[in-house]
Amino acid sequence: MKTYSIAAIPGDGIGKEVVAAGLRVLGACASRDANFQLSIEEFPWGSDFYKQHGHLMPEDGVDQLKNFDAIYFGAVGAPDVPDHLTLWGLRLAICQPLDQYANVRPTRILPGIESPLRGVTAKDLDWVIVRENSEGEYAGQGGRSHRGLAEEVATEVSIFTRAGVTCIMRFAFKLAQSRPRKLLTVVTKSNAQRHGMVLWDEIAKEIAAEFPDVTWDKMLVDAMTVRMTLNPGSIDTIVATNLHADILSDLAAALAGSIGIAPTANLNPEGRFPSMFEPIHGSAFDITGKGIANPIGTFWSAVMMLAHLGEAAAAARLMRAIERVTANPSLHTPDLRGTATTQDVTEAVCAAVLGDN
Ligand code: ATP
Ligand code: MG
């Protein structure tokens, strides 16, 4: 029997609630499956840690994570700590050194859940967004001069490298090729951003030549929001920059019913470092402590984690359990216009995992 070591970082706000729920569900998956066990270690990093220590995780935090098989993450951010500090101090401080350059965000309308788009069903909306996760607009380069003066200037520099863009593009083409429709849309803003985005267009064309069986097209990001809303069935796999894909994936999650449902994998595809799995939503302090956070995005992230660990049967079993629960409207949380609690959903998913044949 294999034992996988998982580092759990619940973080802040509802991150703590949904990761606790996710760990219960993962426990049910491990006890249902004779092939593997999970050894979980929790790390209390995030905004509370910051208030005590002045940083969001210890200086050797990344080293502490390096030998785990995977990282299960909640959310980071608190109302009384600036957002850019929390994002850079924890999430990006883990993703970047662990070379998790491919951020993968599936979106699908799950059974029992209604899209806000009239008449749109799972057959029209079944997408995967690939987000470049280590450079671009989040390269962290730039600065400010003449602070506070009328002449103040701030620059925010996007960095695109041939190596980085090639890696994410090849990853996206491969992923599109593995899906039934073999369809990829490369999203840029190369009409207005004439350096990095034009490099994306050029590299897309080069990599496309390696994948003659993948049908692909290019789209400007503004037009893409319209296409996602008005013609969702024309889309399958999307690849976009760090910022563009971040925005498109919130839209995708909302079109699929709720931001509370959507999962993310931050992958180091070569497996040199652990990959990290988390819901796409944030710490949501407006609902923290109420017990009503939708844990489905965190459960679906656990599906991606199990699949990444090589436990395909357990991953499929957990996905079936999630779908059995979403199919029942009395188990919908308030973000889906239901009255169920996080705990109701968690217990139902655990029971469905344990009862699955
Ligand atoms: P952050 O800065 O950490 O991203 P945020 O408040 O800007 O936090 P989210 O935390 O993603 O963004 O929350 C956006 C909205 O979606 C909030 O109204 C929140 O309550 C809601 N929301 C987010 N996640 C969930 C969830 N799992 N279940 C229910 N509602 C959610
Ligand atoms: Mg947010």
Image (spheres, helix red, strand yellow):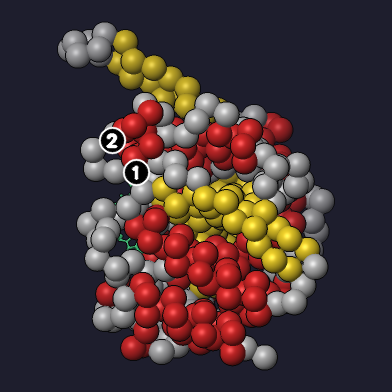
| Residue at point 36%, 88% (across, down) | 329
Of residues 331 and 188, the one nearer the viewer is: 331
Find disc 2 in the rendering and name its residue: 81
Q: Say which amino acid is labelled 1.
A: Gly
Q: Quadrant of residue 337?
A: bottom left
> Disc 2 marks which amino acid?
Val
Asked whether disc 1 touches disc 2, contact meaning CB atoms under 8 Å apart, the reply is yes
Q: Residue 149 at what x, y percent from top left?
A: 19, 10
- Rendered residue at 51%/69% (across/down): 24
Disc 1: which residue: 77
Would residue 329 appear left or right of 356 to someone viewing this image?
left
Residue at point 62% right, 88% down?
356
Which secondary structure, mark 1? loop
Location of residue 38 with respect to 7 vertically, above or below? below
Q: Which mark is residue 187?
A: none
**Distance from the alpha carbon under mark 1 to that under mark 2:** 7 Å
**Viewer-proximal residue, 236 or 217?**
236
The residue at label 1 has a CB less than 8 Å from ligand 1: yes
Asked whether residue 254 appears in the rendered view, the answer is: no
Dot 1: within a 10 Å radius of its alpha carbon, few (fewer than 14), some, or many (20 or more) residues? many
Relative to 21, residue 248 above or below: above
| Quadrant of the frame with the C terminus | bottom right
| Residue 10 in picture, x, y percent from top left | 45, 52
Q: Quadrant of residue 342?
A: bottom left
User: Residue at coordinates 25% horizontally, 12% vertically from top-left?
Assistant: 147
Q: Position of residue 355 (x, y in %)?
A: 59, 90
Disc 2, SS: loop
